[in-house]
Structure formats: C-alpha cells, structure tokens
Image (spheres, grey):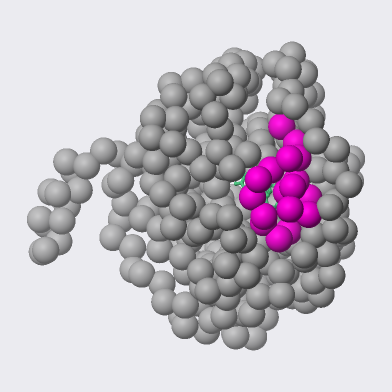
Amino acid sequence: MPSADLKNAASSLPPNLLHPAAPAWRTADIEALFELPFNDLLFRAQQVHRANFDANAVQRSTLLSVKTGGCSEDCGYCSQSTHHDTGLEREALLPLDEVIEAAQAARDQGATRFCMGAAWRGPKQKDLEKVKEMVRAVKDLGLETCVTLGMLQDGQAEQLKAAGLDYYNHNLDTAPEFYAQVISTHSQADRFDTLQKVRDAGINVCCGGIVGMGESRRARAALIAELANMDPPPESVPINNLVTIPGTPLADAPPLDPFEFARTIACARITMPTSMVRLSAGRQQMSDELQALCFLAGANSIFYGDKLLTADNPEAERDENLFARLGLKAM
Ligand code: SAM
Ligand code: DTB
Ligand code: SF4
C-alpha cells in the first residue's frame, strides 16, 4: 500500500493502533547490537534515551501480591507455582482495606504507579469483581493502576478498563525457541492472545521478560526483537534478572554476567526508543554500580519498595540514597 493510503487507513483505526511505521527488527540486527563494544553500545543507548526522555528521571512503581501462591502454571522460575516445592505459603485474595493501606503507603513513599499481581492462570469472574474494586480504590488515591492476573477471557480487559485500569502486565518472558524449556502449561501464542485483548480494550501494555535463565545471547536478542516488533511496542518494558528461588527448576541457573544484563537493557532502549524500560526483578542482588550502568543504558523505571511479589527488593532508603548519589530524580 502506498504510504498516503496507509496513513488514511491508519486514521480510521482506534487510537491504540496508531503508530509510526516502525521498521521490523531482525534478531540478527539485535545480536549485532549486543556484539558492539560495551562503550559503543551504551553510548548509542544513551543517545536514544536522551532524544526521548529526561536522562536523569526515573519512574517508580510499587508491587503488591494480592493473591499469593497456589498457581496452576509451571513457570520454571516462579516461587508461586504448585509444580515446585518452594515452601511458599499460599494466601487467599487480600481484602480491599489491606490493598488500600499498601497503596497509600506506596504513594506516601513516592511511587506513582501501583501494580497488583495475582498468581492465577487467569481470573475467574468472581475474582475479577474484587480486583475491579481494588483498581477503582487505587485509582481514587491518585495513583496509576496496573494489574497482572494471567490470561484474560473475552470481555475481561474491557471490564478492567471501565474500572480505571491504566496498565496490564503480561510478559513474553523469553525467546519463542526457549519458551517450552521454561513453561509447558501455556504457550507464547496464549500470551499474545491476552496482549491483543489488552490492546483492543485501550489499556496500556506492560510487557517484557526475564534473562539469566541459561538462555543464549541469541535468545535474549530474539526476545527483544519480539517485544520491539509488537505493533505498537509495549508502553512499558520490564526487564527482570532471574531471582533464583530454591525448589524451582531454575534454582541453580548460573548468574548472568552483569555487563550482559546492562547490554540487554541497552538493546531494549535502542529498539524501543519511546517505551519506559524498567530495571525490574533482581535489583536486590545487584551492585549500585550495575544499577547505575543500567540507568546509563536507558532504564528509566524501577520497582520501588522492599518487596517484589514474593522476593526481596531494595529498601526505599537504599534507593533514595542511590538516586541522591547519582543525581537522579523521581519522574
Ligand atoms: N501470574 C501472572 C503472569 O504470569 O503473568 C502474573 C505474575 S508473574 C509473577 C509476573 C512476571 O514476574 C513473570 O512473567 C516473570 O517475568 C516475572 N518473574 C516471576 N518470577 C520471577 C523470578 N524468580 N525472577 C525474575 N522474574 C520473575
Ligand atoms: C514483572 O515483569 N516483574 C514483576 C511484575 N512484572 C509483576 C514481578 C517480579 C517477580 C519477582 C519474583 C517474586 O517476587 O516472586
Ligand atoms: Fe503462575 Fe505467573 Fe508464577 Fe507462572 S509466573 S507460575 S503464571 S504466578
């Protein structure tokens, strides 16, 4: 189609499908980025970052597990799967007042987004009703809202949107060729199906993955290519460094070279110039220096507060201190 026709066709689409004609990224292109000398890669990422964002501003989201453990899925990294013996205590859906209290505390600490996670394959309608109340209440506190509830059925995303949901987190997690080695109870096609429902409902997409699971560099490049080629790319891209959980199949995965982690962030920044790239799980195990390199590589968001869902995250005080030492300001 000639480009003028493409523009006309685009103007009749709902706003969430409008996007600048983005070139498709090939895995090989991203592997070539990974292979650049470290300084060249970080310089390029920093240039892209500065062209699109305030280079010294970092957004902060706080997580709360609203329903912990007992998940039917077998994700090889996860503390919450019933397939692994991790010793995690299963908990029922939290009452609304506890969620409000946690959201208020997060807001008072300086978070601007509150993300509620549930260890479900997907929500049942009666559970969704309760999550909708949580979304409404958190929104009323003036926070941006995000939930991660697993796979959605037809109509559920629209209900969440009507309740005031701003973001839905649903990760591609790893490269298509590595996926089945990590998860067997659902496929990446299932993940795309839910992501499309989220897009169609007009909810912002938060979608990223995990590295450090023993995947190859090519697999990391393939994951970034899949994310960058989403049309449009996710508004928010969490890059998690595996937190090894005793009792899971990935408990003994060898740690990823920290420079390779920073390279992954840089590749995400270069290929998704206007997305928020979140330095996500694994910060507790990272040095301050590695985190600083990740900000230099273009990360501009973090999970903030001393817990992720079940794993530890740096205390707010350590982050405040790091921000002060680096001259970073909250977004
Ligand atoms: N059950 C929902 C799902 O799978 O989408 C939501 C919660 S799940 C815990 C959210 C994401 O957290 C996963 O997709 C994965 O990327 C990340 N994650 C889970 N366990 C992790 C771990 N041990 N280390 C790093 N990231 C992890
Ligand atoms: C995401 O990509 N990372 C967050 C959030 N989305 C829900 C979760 C990280 C979980 C880390 C392991 C845990 O706390 O159990
Ligand atoms: Fe369940 Fe999500 Fe954990 Fe997979 S990552 S086992 S779907 S909670």
Q: Which is more toward the observer, 206 or 254?
A: 254
Q: Nearer the viewer, residue 132 or 39?
A: 132
Magenta range: 67-84
Is 80 included in the stretch rendered in magenta?
yes
Q: Is residue 9 left or right of residue 238?
A: left
Q: Is residue 35 visible?
A: yes
**Could you say where residue 116 lies in the image, as x and y percent from the top left?**
66, 33
- Total numbered labels: 0
Which residue is depicted at the point 74% across and 53% down?
83
Q: Quadrant of the N terminus?
A: bottom left
Which quarter of the figure has residue 297?
A: bottom right
Q: Residue at x 17, y 41 (%)?
A: 12
Instruction: State whether the magenta stretch is mostly helix, strand or loop.
Output: loop
- From the image, which quarter does the C terminus lie in? top right
Q: Residue at (59%, 42%) from the top-left corner?
A: 121
Expressed as whole percent of the image width and height from the top left, the position of residue 194 reads 45, 45
Q: Would residue 330 be visible to someone looking at this image?
A: no
Residue at 85% over, 43% down = 88
From the viewer's perspective, is 251 left or right of 274?
right
